[in-house]
Image (cartoon, helix red, strand yellow):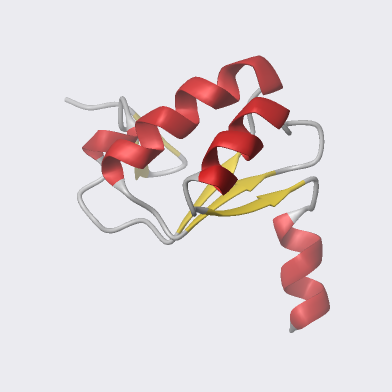
Amino acid sequence: AGQTILGEKVLASIQDVPEDIDIIDVFRRPSAVPALAEEAKKKGFGVFWMQPGTESPEAIKHLDQEGYRVVAGRCAKIESNRLL
């Protein structure tokens, strides 16, 4: 039996997500983000979004140089409320 949180199945890695990923919304310490970005590139995604306090200059640089869409230092909830 797999683990669940708030009724949602917990997956071990980004690679385990069966659907296409539109946004990877990061809530990790900055030192963990470069490895997460590398894992995300293997899966594919639309936008790599680093919440305030999670920004990794290294990950931003590499993702940007490779043509990925990156948002850093902005809160997804605040931005969605602002846009809606």
Quadrant housing the C terminus: bottom right
Note whether residue 56 is visible. Answer: no
Query: Extreme top residue here?
Result: 31
Residue 52 drawn above or below residue 29: below
Compared across the picture, whether 7 is left or right of 63 comes to: left
Q: Is residue 5 above or below residue 3?
A: below
Q: Residue at x 65, y 15 (%)?
A: 31
Q: Residue furthest front?
A: 65
Query: Between 53 and 65, which is closer to the camera in this rendering?
Result: 65
Query: Which quadrant of the structure image shows residue 57?
Result: top right
Residue at image position (20%, 49%) is 18
What residue is at 69 percent from the left and 22 percent from the top?
30
At x 71%, y 58%, the residue is 76
23 on left or right of 43: right
Corner quadrant of residue 46: bottom left
Residue 40 at least partly seen = yes
Q: Toward the viewer: 62 or 21?
A: 62
Image x and y of residue 75, in percent: 77, 53
Residue ranking furthest to the bottom:
84
